Amino acid sequence: MEGIIFAVILVVLAVLGVATSVVTVKQGYEYTLERLGKYTTTLKPGFSLIVPFIDRIGHRMNMMEQVLDIPTQEIITRDNAVVSVDGVVFYQVLDAAKAAYEVSNLTAAVTALTQTNLRTVMGALDLDESLSKRDEINARLLAVIDNATAPWGLKVTRVEVRDIQPPNDIQNAMARQMKAEREKRAVTLEAEGLRAAAILKAEGEKQAQILEAEGRREAAFRDAEARERSAEAEANATAMVSKAIAEGDLQAINYFVALKYTEALTSFAASPNAKTIFMPLEASSLIGSVGGITELVKGLGDTPRPGGSPPSAPEPRPASPWKGA
Protein backbone atom coordinates (compact mmCIF):
# COMPACT_ATOMS: atom_id res chain seq x y z
CA MET A 1 0.00 0.00 0.00
CA GLU A 2 2.75 2.38 0.92
CA GLY A 3 4.51 1.54 -2.37
CA ILE A 4 1.43 2.45 -4.37
CA ILE A 5 1.13 5.83 -2.63
CA PHE A 6 4.78 6.51 -3.22
CA ALA A 7 4.39 5.67 -6.92
CA VAL A 8 1.44 7.96 -7.25
CA ILE A 9 3.40 10.80 -5.64
CA LEU A 10 6.26 10.20 -8.06
CA VAL A 11 3.92 10.27 -11.02
CA VAL A 12 2.33 13.53 -9.86
CA LEU A 13 5.74 15.12 -9.33
CA ALA A 14 6.85 13.96 -12.76
CA VAL A 15 3.77 15.44 -14.39
CA LEU A 16 4.26 18.70 -12.54
CA GLY A 17 7.94 18.73 -13.48
CA VAL A 18 7.19 18.22 -17.15
CA ALA A 19 4.45 20.84 -17.08
CA THR A 20 6.67 23.40 -15.41
CA SER A 21 9.65 22.66 -17.65
CA VAL A 22 7.82 23.48 -20.87
CA VAL A 23 7.41 27.22 -21.73
CA THR A 24 5.68 28.58 -24.86
CA VAL A 25 6.47 32.20 -25.76
CA LYS A 26 3.96 34.03 -28.00
CA GLN A 27 5.00 35.97 -31.07
CA GLY A 28 5.84 39.59 -30.27
CA TYR A 29 6.94 38.79 -26.72
CA GLU A 30 10.14 37.75 -24.96
CA TYR A 31 10.46 36.25 -21.48
CA THR A 32 13.34 36.70 -19.08
CA LEU A 33 14.49 33.49 -17.35
CA GLU A 34 15.68 33.58 -13.73
CA ARG A 35 17.51 30.74 -12.04
CA LEU A 36 17.34 30.88 -8.30
CA GLY A 37 16.35 34.54 -8.59
CA LYS A 38 19.14 35.58 -10.96
CA TYR A 39 18.68 36.50 -14.63
CA THR A 40 20.23 33.92 -16.90
CA THR A 41 18.80 34.28 -20.44
CA THR A 42 15.94 35.55 -22.56
CA LEU A 43 13.41 33.15 -24.09
CA LYS A 44 12.46 33.93 -27.68
CA PRO A 45 9.03 33.26 -29.24
CA GLY A 46 8.33 29.55 -29.55
CA PHE A 47 8.84 26.35 -27.46
CA SER A 48 11.48 26.31 -24.66
CA LEU A 49 12.49 23.91 -21.84
CA ILE A 50 13.58 25.04 -18.38
CA VAL A 51 14.68 23.28 -15.20
CA PRO A 52 11.62 22.72 -13.01
CA PHE A 53 11.55 24.22 -9.53
CA ILE A 54 14.88 26.01 -10.21
CA ASP A 55 14.18 28.22 -13.23
CA ARG A 56 11.23 30.54 -13.44
CA ILE A 57 9.89 33.26 -15.77
CA GLY A 58 10.91 36.71 -14.50
CA HIS A 59 9.23 39.27 -16.85
CA ARG A 60 7.07 38.93 -19.91
CA MET A 61 8.15 41.83 -22.17
CA ASN A 62 6.10 43.13 -25.10
CA MET A 63 8.51 43.62 -28.01
CA MET A 64 5.99 45.32 -30.31
CA GLU A 65 5.83 49.09 -30.80
CA GLN A 66 3.66 50.64 -28.15
CA VAL A 67 1.83 53.94 -27.67
CA LEU A 68 2.07 55.80 -24.37
CA ASP A 69 -0.27 58.69 -23.59
CA ILE A 70 1.33 61.68 -21.86
CA PRO A 71 -1.12 63.27 -19.39
CA THR A 72 -2.08 66.93 -19.73
CA GLN A 73 0.12 69.34 -17.82
CA GLU A 74 0.34 73.12 -17.53
CA ILE A 75 3.49 74.75 -18.89
CA ILE A 76 4.67 78.36 -18.59
CA THR A 77 6.16 79.67 -21.83
CA ARG A 78 8.98 82.18 -22.13
CA ASP A 79 6.52 85.09 -22.36
CA ASN A 80 4.74 83.92 -19.14
CA ALA A 81 1.71 82.42 -20.88
CA VAL A 82 0.24 79.33 -19.20
CA VAL A 83 -0.78 76.58 -21.65
CA SER A 84 -2.10 73.05 -21.17
CA VAL A 85 -0.17 70.46 -23.19
CA ASP A 86 -0.46 66.72 -23.70
CA GLY A 87 1.07 64.27 -26.17
CA VAL A 88 1.88 60.71 -27.14
CA VAL A 89 5.09 58.67 -27.30
CA PHE A 90 5.72 55.73 -29.62
CA TYR A 91 8.42 53.35 -28.38
CA GLN A 92 9.63 49.78 -28.82
CA VAL A 93 11.57 47.45 -26.50
CA LEU A 94 14.74 46.24 -28.19
CA ASP A 95 16.42 44.54 -25.21
CA ALA A 96 14.06 42.69 -22.87
CA ALA A 97 16.63 42.19 -20.14
CA LYS A 98 17.52 45.88 -19.93
CA ALA A 99 13.88 46.93 -20.04
CA ALA A 100 13.12 44.49 -17.22
CA TYR A 101 16.06 45.09 -14.92
CA GLU A 102 17.48 48.56 -15.70
CA VAL A 103 14.34 50.48 -14.72
CA SER A 104 11.71 49.64 -12.13
CA ASN A 105 8.56 50.89 -13.89
CA LEU A 106 9.14 51.36 -17.59
CA THR A 107 5.96 53.22 -18.56
CA ALA A 108 6.09 55.53 -15.53
CA ALA A 109 9.73 56.35 -16.26
CA VAL A 110 9.04 57.19 -19.92
CA THR A 111 6.02 59.31 -18.94
CA ALA A 112 7.95 61.32 -16.34
CA LEU A 113 10.92 61.78 -18.68
CA THR A 114 8.67 63.05 -21.47
CA GLN A 115 6.81 65.47 -19.23
CA THR A 116 9.97 67.04 -17.82
CA ASN A 117 11.58 67.46 -21.24
CA LEU A 118 8.33 68.85 -22.65
CA ARG A 119 8.34 71.56 -19.98
CA THR A 120 11.99 72.31 -20.74
CA VAL A 121 11.52 72.61 -24.50
CA MET A 122 8.30 74.63 -24.47
CA GLY A 123 9.45 76.85 -21.60
CA ALA A 124 12.21 78.15 -23.89
CA LEU A 125 9.68 79.26 -26.55
CA ASP A 126 7.15 82.05 -26.82
CA LEU A 127 3.46 81.27 -27.10
CA ASP A 128 3.37 82.01 -30.82
CA GLU A 129 6.43 79.82 -31.38
CA SER A 130 4.89 77.03 -29.33
CA LEU A 131 1.79 77.09 -31.50
CA SER A 132 3.61 77.37 -34.84
CA LYS A 133 6.72 75.21 -34.32
CA ARG A 134 5.30 71.83 -33.37
CA ASP A 135 7.60 69.97 -35.73
CA GLU A 136 10.63 71.54 -34.08
CA ILE A 137 9.29 70.70 -30.60
CA ASN A 138 8.64 67.08 -31.64
CA ALA A 139 12.12 66.70 -33.11
CA ARG A 140 13.85 68.08 -30.01
CA LEU A 141 11.80 65.89 -27.68
CA LEU A 142 12.50 62.81 -29.79
CA ALA A 143 16.27 63.40 -29.73
CA VAL A 144 16.38 63.95 -25.96
CA ILE A 145 14.04 61.10 -24.92
CA ASP A 146 15.55 58.55 -27.31
CA ASN A 147 19.02 59.29 -25.98
CA ALA A 148 17.86 59.09 -22.34
CA THR A 149 15.99 55.78 -22.75
CA ALA A 150 18.75 53.99 -24.71
CA PRO A 151 20.23 52.41 -21.50
CA TRP A 152 16.78 50.92 -20.79
CA GLY A 153 16.80 48.95 -24.03
CA LEU A 154 14.15 51.17 -25.66
CA LYS A 155 13.89 52.81 -29.04
CA VAL A 156 11.64 55.89 -29.09
CA THR A 157 10.35 56.19 -32.65
CA ARG A 158 8.11 59.24 -32.42
CA VAL A 159 7.07 61.95 -29.98
CA GLU A 160 4.01 64.05 -30.84
CA VAL A 161 2.57 67.07 -29.04
CA ARG A 162 -1.12 66.33 -29.35
CA ASP A 163 -2.82 69.45 -28.01
CA ILE A 164 -1.74 72.92 -26.89
CA GLN A 165 -4.56 74.75 -25.12
CA PRO A 166 -4.01 78.41 -24.14
CA PRO A 167 -6.23 80.05 -21.50
CA ASN A 168 -9.60 81.48 -22.55
CA ASP A 169 -8.51 85.12 -22.31
CA ILE A 170 -5.54 84.45 -24.56
CA GLN A 171 -7.77 82.60 -27.00
CA ASN A 172 -10.14 85.58 -27.11
CA ALA A 173 -7.24 87.96 -27.68
CA MET A 174 -5.92 85.74 -30.46
CA ALA A 175 -9.36 85.65 -32.06
CA ARG A 176 -9.59 89.46 -31.98
CA GLN A 177 -6.09 89.74 -33.39
CA MET A 178 -6.93 87.35 -36.20
CA LYS A 179 -10.13 89.26 -36.97
CA ALA A 180 -8.25 92.57 -37.04
CA GLU A 181 -5.61 91.07 -39.31
CA ARG A 182 -8.23 89.81 -41.73
CA GLU A 183 -10.04 93.15 -41.73
CA LYS A 184 -6.69 94.84 -42.39
CA ARG A 185 -6.07 92.53 -45.33
CA ALA A 186 -9.57 93.20 -46.67
CA VAL A 187 -9.11 96.99 -46.43
CA THR A 188 -5.68 96.71 -48.04
CA LEU A 189 -7.01 94.63 -50.91
CA GLU A 190 -9.93 97.01 -51.39
CA ALA A 191 -7.58 100.01 -51.43
CA GLU A 192 -5.31 98.28 -53.92
CA GLY A 193 -8.33 97.53 -56.10
CA LEU A 194 -9.48 101.16 -56.01
CA ARG A 195 -5.95 102.31 -56.77
CA ALA A 196 -5.68 99.97 -59.73
CA ALA A 197 -9.10 101.09 -60.98
CA ALA A 198 -8.12 104.77 -60.67
CA ILE A 199 -4.87 104.12 -62.53
CA LEU A 200 -6.69 102.29 -65.30
CA LYS A 201 -9.29 105.05 -65.53
CA ALA A 202 -6.59 107.73 -65.70
CA GLU A 203 -4.72 105.74 -68.34
CA GLY A 204 -7.95 105.43 -70.34
CA GLU A 205 -8.69 109.15 -70.10
CA LYS A 206 -5.10 109.94 -71.07
CA GLN A 207 -5.31 107.64 -74.07
CA ALA A 208 -8.66 109.14 -75.05
CA GLN A 209 -7.24 112.67 -74.87
CA ILE A 210 -4.22 111.61 -76.92
CA LEU A 211 -6.45 110.05 -79.56
CA GLU A 212 -8.71 113.11 -79.57
CA ALA A 213 -5.70 115.43 -79.98
CA GLU A 214 -4.37 113.26 -82.78
CA GLY A 215 -7.81 113.39 -84.43
CA ARG A 216 -7.93 117.19 -84.17
CA ARG A 217 -4.42 117.43 -85.57
CA GLU A 218 -5.30 115.14 -88.45
CA ALA A 219 -8.49 117.13 -89.10
CA ALA A 220 -6.51 120.39 -89.04
CA PHE A 221 -4.00 118.92 -91.49
CA ARG A 222 -6.83 117.79 -93.75
CA ASP A 223 -8.59 121.21 -93.52
CA ALA A 224 -5.35 123.00 -94.27
CA GLU A 225 -4.69 120.69 -97.18
CA ALA A 226 -8.23 121.26 -98.48
CA ARG A 227 -7.87 125.04 -98.16
CA GLU A 228 -4.50 124.86 -99.86
CA ARG A 229 -5.94 122.87 -102.75
CA SER A 230 -8.94 125.21 -102.94
CA ALA A 231 -6.58 128.19 -103.02
CA GLU A 232 -4.48 126.51 -105.68
CA ALA A 233 -7.61 125.79 -107.73
CA GLU A 234 -8.77 129.41 -107.24
CA ALA A 235 -5.35 130.70 -108.24
CA ASN A 236 -5.27 128.41 -111.26
CA ALA A 237 -8.77 129.49 -112.27
CA THR A 238 -7.87 133.18 -111.82
CA ALA A 239 -4.69 132.70 -113.81
CA MET A 240 -6.56 130.95 -116.60
CA VAL A 241 -9.23 133.69 -116.69
CA SER A 242 -6.54 136.39 -116.64
CA LYS A 243 -4.75 134.66 -119.48
CA ALA A 244 -8.01 134.36 -121.41
CA ILE A 245 -8.76 138.07 -120.81
CA ALA A 246 -5.28 138.99 -121.96
CA GLU A 247 -5.85 136.93 -125.12
CA GLY A 248 -9.24 138.58 -125.70
CA ASP A 249 -11.46 135.55 -124.91
CA LEU A 250 -14.89 137.12 -124.16
CA GLN A 251 -16.44 133.84 -123.07
CA ALA A 252 -13.98 133.57 -120.19
CA ILE A 253 -14.77 137.13 -119.12
CA ASN A 254 -18.49 136.42 -119.16
CA TYR A 255 -17.98 133.26 -117.10
CA PHE A 256 -15.79 135.00 -114.53
CA VAL A 257 -18.16 137.99 -114.09
CA ALA A 258 -21.22 135.77 -113.88
CA LEU A 259 -19.52 133.55 -111.26
CA LYS A 260 -18.62 136.50 -109.05
CA TYR A 261 -22.08 138.01 -109.47
CA THR A 262 -23.70 134.77 -108.42
CA GLU A 263 -21.40 134.42 -105.38
CA ALA A 264 -22.26 137.97 -104.33
CA LEU A 265 -25.98 137.24 -104.53
CA THR A 266 -25.47 134.04 -102.52
CA SER A 267 -23.61 135.89 -99.77
CA PHE A 268 -26.37 138.50 -99.62
CA ALA A 269 -29.01 135.82 -99.23
CA ALA A 270 -27.00 133.96 -96.57
CA SER A 271 -26.54 137.03 -94.35
CA PRO A 272 -28.30 136.56 -90.97
CA ASN A 273 -29.24 140.28 -90.87
CA ALA A 274 -30.90 140.27 -94.25
CA LYS A 275 -34.67 139.94 -94.07
CA THR A 276 -35.83 141.29 -97.46
CA ILE A 277 -33.64 142.13 -100.48
CA PHE A 278 -34.86 144.05 -103.62
CA MET A 279 -32.49 143.57 -106.49
CA PRO A 280 -32.90 143.33 -110.29
CA LEU A 281 -32.58 139.64 -110.80
CA GLU A 282 -33.73 139.53 -114.46
CA ALA A 283 -31.51 137.68 -116.80
CA SER A 284 -31.17 140.77 -119.00
CA SER A 285 -29.64 142.67 -116.07
CA LEU A 286 -26.95 140.04 -115.62
CA ILE A 287 -26.31 139.99 -119.38
CA GLY A 288 -26.12 143.80 -119.44
CA SER A 289 -23.54 143.81 -116.70
CA VAL A 290 -21.51 141.25 -118.52
CA GLY A 291 -21.85 143.26 -121.70
CA GLY A 292 -20.54 146.43 -120.02
CA ILE A 293 -17.44 144.63 -118.86
CA THR A 294 -17.06 143.12 -122.30
CA GLU A 295 -16.98 146.63 -123.87
CA LEU A 296 -14.16 147.54 -121.48
CA VAL A 297 -12.19 144.50 -122.49
CA LYS A 298 -12.82 145.27 -126.15
CA GLY A 299 -11.38 148.72 -125.59
CA LEU A 300 -8.28 147.11 -124.25
CA GLY A 301 -8.20 144.75 -127.17
CA ASP A 302 -8.03 147.61 -129.75
CA THR A 303 -4.34 147.98 -129.08
CA PRO A 304 -2.23 146.47 -131.83
CA ARG A 305 -1.09 142.90 -131.16
CA PRO A 306 2.38 141.64 -131.77
CA GLY A 307 2.80 140.43 -135.32
CA GLY A 308 0.82 143.39 -136.90
CA SER A 309 -2.55 141.62 -137.13
CA PRO A 310 -5.48 144.08 -136.94
CA PRO A 311 -7.89 143.72 -134.07
CA SER A 312 -11.05 141.82 -134.69
CA ALA A 313 -14.32 143.69 -135.36
CA PRO A 314 -16.37 144.36 -132.26
CA GLU A 315 -19.42 142.21 -131.81
CA PRO A 316 -22.77 143.87 -131.21
CA ARG A 317 -23.69 143.90 -127.56
CA PRO A 318 -27.20 143.78 -126.17
CA ALA A 319 -28.83 146.91 -124.87
CA SER A 320 -28.44 147.45 -121.19
CA PRO A 321 -31.64 147.39 -119.18
CA TRP A 322 -30.38 150.33 -117.17
CA LYS A 323 -30.31 152.76 -120.15
CA GLY A 324 -32.85 155.46 -120.04
CA ALA A 325 -33.53 154.73 -116.43
Image (tube, rainbow, N blue to C red):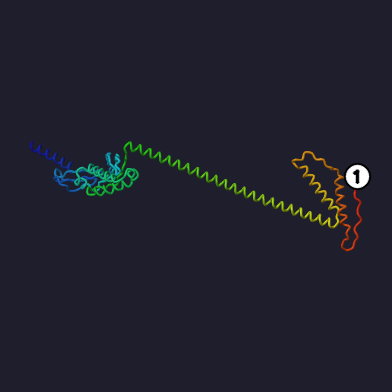
Q: Quadrant of the C terminus?
A: top right
Residue 70 position (above or below residue 315): above
Total residue callouts: 1
Name the one closer to the observer, 227 or 125: 227
Q: Please, which residue is most extreme toward the front here?
A: 325
Give the amino acid type for the residue marked by disc 1 in the picture.
Gly
Residue 247 position (above or below residue 41): below
Q: As drawn, is 217 to the left or to the right of 261?
A: left
Q: As drawn, is 13 to the left or to the right of 67?
A: left
Task: Decide if residue 24 is in sight here.
Answer: no
Where residue 221 appears, as percent x and y from the top left, is 67, 52
Q: Residue drawn at (81%, 56%), measured in percent from left and top?
A: 242
Task: Decide if residue 273 is in sight here.
Answer: yes
Q: Residue drawn at (10%, 37%), measured in percent from left and top?
A: 5
Q: Quadrant of the N terminus?
A: top left
Residue 71 position (above or below residue 315): above
Name the one closer to the observer, 186 or 198: 198
Where residue 136 appears, as percent x and y from the top left, is 32, 47
Q: As drawn, is 141 to the left or to the right of 303?
A: left
Name the one closer to the observer, 3 or 75: 75
Q: As drawn, is 120 to the left or to the right of 293?
A: left
**SS at mark 1 in the image:** loop
Name the one closer to the observer, 253 or 162: 253
Q: Please, which residue is most extreme toward the bottom here?
A: 307
Q: Please, which residue is most extreme toward the left here?
A: 2
Q: Residue drawn at (92%, 56%), measured in percent from left and top?
A: 313
Where residue 54 appears, as percent x and y from the top left, is 14, 44
Q: Residue drawn at (55%, 46%), measured in percent from left and top?
A: 202
Q: Mark 1 packing: few (<14 Cα in 10 Å), some, or many (20+)?
A: few
Where residue 204 appears, as percent x and y from the top left, is 57, 46
Residue placed under numbered mark 1 in the picture: 324
- Quarter where residue 241 is shown: bottom right
